[in-house]
Amino acid sequence: MNGFTTKISGPFIVIGDVHGQIDLLLDLLNNLKKAVKDFDKRWLVFVGDLVDRGKDSKQVIQLVIDLILNREKTTGIMGNHEYVLISSLGMLGAERQREWAGMYKKIFSSGPTFSSYNVKEGDLQALKNSMPERHMEFLFSLPWHIEEDGHLIVHAGLFPDKPFKPQLEELKSRSFSTMWIPFFDDPELVSSDPPSDCPLTVISGHVRQPDVIFREKRILLDTTGGLSGNLSAVLLPERKVVTSDRGA
């Protein structure tokens, strides 16, 4: 599962934070196949936070892996929930594990993830033992960004007051010695426009919105937060939205 694509070109689809909601994801994919004539020819990009909150994290991970294996143009990026999960499992070393394990169990709504792998809530060693190697490899290998000719897809956005190029280099480096998400719990900052020297439209999820937000250089598409509502996807370059609504 190594070697994720980080540069794409041509029409593409970005799917918002799934958070273990397998039913919504299946409905959304079904609606996309009906609504998008060239669905199989477009890149399909997952914006991160596949796990936690919803009850089917294991099934979501497996479905995305199956798509990557069987659909040539499928890729994704790492969300903060994936980052904290692999840190808590010790996959990034003892220091990261000490930093995040307690918080993952307490504040990340991780209980359903443990349940999806049929282990006791909070038992990180049992979770690691129960998680298929392919799932762990998939989570560890996810990139932190994807570039397209006019767009940058990241999980949570960019610092609006810092130069663009150093931030892009940090995303490319995937240096696990630092946490790359610059505004962990600041919805206002997450929703801000990119720095003035950024030449690309920045697309992200991370913070729940009532509807997909479109601005000149910003798109935000997490419309469930793993809590309620319809899962959304954005078609680019059309800037059109398809949701998981079964009546859509």
Image: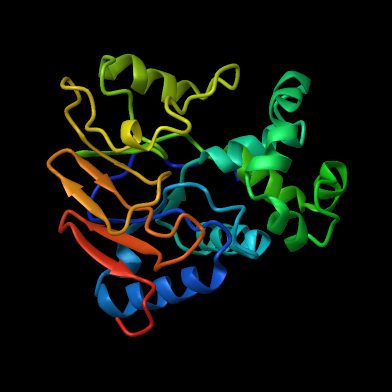
Task: Judge by depth and name the residue closer to the eye, 223 or 23.
Answer: 223
- Residue at 40%, 71% (x, y): give it: 28
**What x and y, as percent, mark residue 71?**
46, 63
Tell me the quarter of the picture where residue 87 sits: top right
Q: Give the left or right position of residue 163, taking residue 244 as reference.
A: left
Task: Judge by depth and name the residue closer to the eye, 185 or 140.
Answer: 185
Tell me the quarter of the picture where residue 229 sits: bottom left
Residue 149 in view here: no
**Furthest residue to the bottom?**
247
In the depicted structure, whether residue 229 falls above or below residue 200: below
**Furthest residue to the left?**
216
Q: Quadrant of the C terminus?
A: bottom left
**What x and y, as percent, mark residue 193?**
22, 32
- Residue at 86%, 42% (x, y): give it: 125
Tell me the quarter of the picture where residue 69 sits: bottom right
In the depicted structure, whether residue 144 falls above or below residue 46: above
**What x and y, as percent, mark residue 173?**
48, 21
**What x and y, as percent, mark residue 47?**
42, 48
- Residue at 60%, 36% (x, y): give it: 83
Give the colour scheme shown. Answer: rainbow
In the depicted structure, whether residue 39 falls above or below residue 184: below
Q: Give the left or right position of residue 53, taking residue 185 as reference.
A: right
How many numbered marks have been drawn onto this rendered protein structure?
A: 0
Q: Give the left or right position of residue 167, taking residue 60 as reference.
A: left
Residue 164 in view here: yes
